[in-house]
Amino acid sequence: MDIQYLLWLQDFRNSINDALTPFMEWVSMFATTYLILFAVFYYWNKDKRDGLYTLVAYYFCMVFTPLIKLTACIYRPWIRDSRILPAGDAIRTATGYSFPSGHTTTAGPLAGGMAVNTWKNRRTRIVSVIFVLFILLTAFSRNYLGVHTPQDVCVALLISVLSLFLAGRLFAYLDEHPEKENMLLLCGLIFCCLALVYITLKPYPMTLNEEGKLIVDPQKMMNDGYGDLGKMIGFIIARFVEKTWVKFKPLKQGWKSVLLCLIGLIPMVLLKKYFSPVMTATFGSHWGKLFFSIIYAFYYIALYPVVLKLFDRE
């Protein structure tokens, strides 16, 4: 049933000469590259707590997704059925195992968290609707491009909803017990370290093709897992630093504060485009992705807020 659905979408793509493929590729790219900028801007400029809520839900997904992916080890649709031919450049950008969809578990908490935040104000509820529609569009784009089955994206959507719910419960608990945050951060750090040990040492499928080569190299499949877990590790370190020493407050001073926050987003784009490959080349695919994710999260959670705090004093 799932393969037949992908074949039907593939026939539709071919019938319109891949006219929608560039747009669907853009949706997928935007979800994993630029969507986080909305949450970070909200964290810096609008509401620190609500911005953190969105980001924490995202980090939950970044922990759940690789653990499920690297436990289930479900092959991509084109490996399971040779009739599936992914569209455009999707086969190159679709890294890791198939289940669940990593693009969807990125769009789900980031756009979902922003939908929750913007729904609180009646004037911005249309923005909330747009965020929800973008989540659904991202999920559909993964099917349309032929890189994920419906099960992959449906489970990813469920993980996203669960992460948003857990983040909400966590923040409600910390509102009543703020003294527990450091202990929770420590527990999270220990869990992430154990998760790294787990995905490194656990056995993986070693299926060979007719030429005697691995159909899927587990070492390559682990790359995203190291990067995703690094995001949570980076957040934990940065959050402790920020809450202990930085203690910034979101800027609400008109166009100057907006401009300063927009300027702060530029290094995020440049880091991801230029610094990430350098880290991978220097430390290898696993540790390079892990270290980059830690640095990346530390920049927007703790480092740039130092600049915002200095500006706020002026």
Image (cartoon, rainbow, N blue to C red):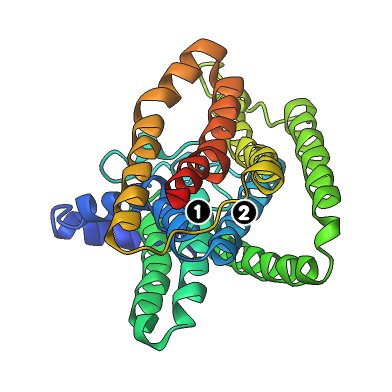
**Residue 242 sits above or below residue 253 on the image:** above
Q: Nearer the viewer, residue 136 or 76?
A: 136
Q: Determine the secondary structure under disc 1.
A: helix
* CA neighbours of label 2 inside 10 A, class few (<14), some (14 to 19), many (20+): many
> Measured from the top left, where is residue 12 in percent x and y?
23, 62
Mark seen at residue 165: none
For residue 8, what is the image quadrant? bottom left
Residue most extreme to the bottom: 122
Q: How many labels does the image show?
A: 2
Query: Would residue 296 appear left or right of 128 to someone viewing this image?
Result: right
Quick one: 81 or 47, which is closer to the camera?
Answer: 47
| Residue 284 screen position, x and y as percent | 55, 15
Identity of the residue drawn at 55% across and 34% down: 293
At 36% from the left and 65% from the top, the residue drawn is 137
- Circle 2 sits on which residue? 61
Residue displayed at 81% across by 49% down: 182
Q: Disc number at residue 106?
A: 1
Given the image, on which type of amino acid does mark 2 rest? Cys
Residue 150 appears anywhere in the view: no
Q: Which of marks 2 and 1 is nearer the N terminus?
A: 2
* Viewer-closest of 131 and 181: 181
Q: What kind of residue is marked 1?
A: Thr
